[in-house]
Amino acid sequence: MENLETDSVKQRQVLFNELHPDPDQAGTAADLLKGIDGILEATAESSVLLQIRYNVLQISLEQIETGLVETGFHLSNRLIYALKRALYHYTEETQRANSGCPRGDCNCTKKVFIERYSQRDHRLKDQRPEHWRKYL
């Protein structure tokens, strides 16, 4: 039973694209993911590298990445990282299916969206500089 519990805890790295309005995507993502069930630890190793530890029986890497992408983060699309992600997604879904976890359980993904939405500033913002606003 001890081996089953250690097999269900995964440690992965998520690399973000450098070209993004938020210069510290990893730090912002780590703060966002800390309250999600199943995520044991989320730390920013650098401004674009996120280190996460999670229980695969509660949440999968695919669900985490889907939540991050849909809340506005840009994952790195380099070939090696895309291949790693595809392999991790496949192995985790296989492990979850063998353990009896249903595919498509998006409860944790919804929590990411709700948390991100509640933290956003919902006021209208004018993108123009202050001195341009009086001319239009």
Image: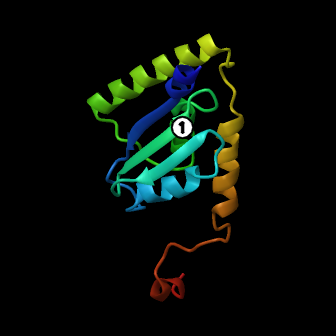
What is the x, y in percent for residue 122? 68, 66
Q: In terms of depth relative to the viewer, which is nearer, 47 or 113?
A: 47
What is the x, y in percent for residue 37? 66, 42
What residue is disc 1 on?
Answer: 54
On screen, 15 above or below 89? below
In the displayed orientation, state which residue is furthest to the front. Answer: 2
Q: Which residue occupies 40% across, 20% down?
A: 87
**Amino acid at dot 1:** Tyr
SS class of the residue under badge 1? strand
What is the x, y in percent for residue 29? 50, 53
What is the x, y in percent for residue 65? 50, 38
On screen, 98 above or below 62? above
Dot 1, crowdedness within 10 Å: few (<14), some or many (≥20)?
A: many
Q: In terms of depth relative to the viewer, which is nearer, 71 or 63?
A: 63
On screen, 43 above or below 135? above
Q: Which residue occupies 40% across, 61% down?
A: 24
Q: Which residue occupies 48% across, 76% down?
A: 128
Q: Is residue 89 left or right of residue 109?
A: left
| Quadrant of the rendering where the N terminus is positioned | top right
Count the numbered circles shown: 1
Q: Which residue occupies 32% across, 32% down?
A: 81
| Quadrant of the rendering where the C terminus is positioned | bottom right
Q: Quadrant for residue 31, please give it.
A: bottom right
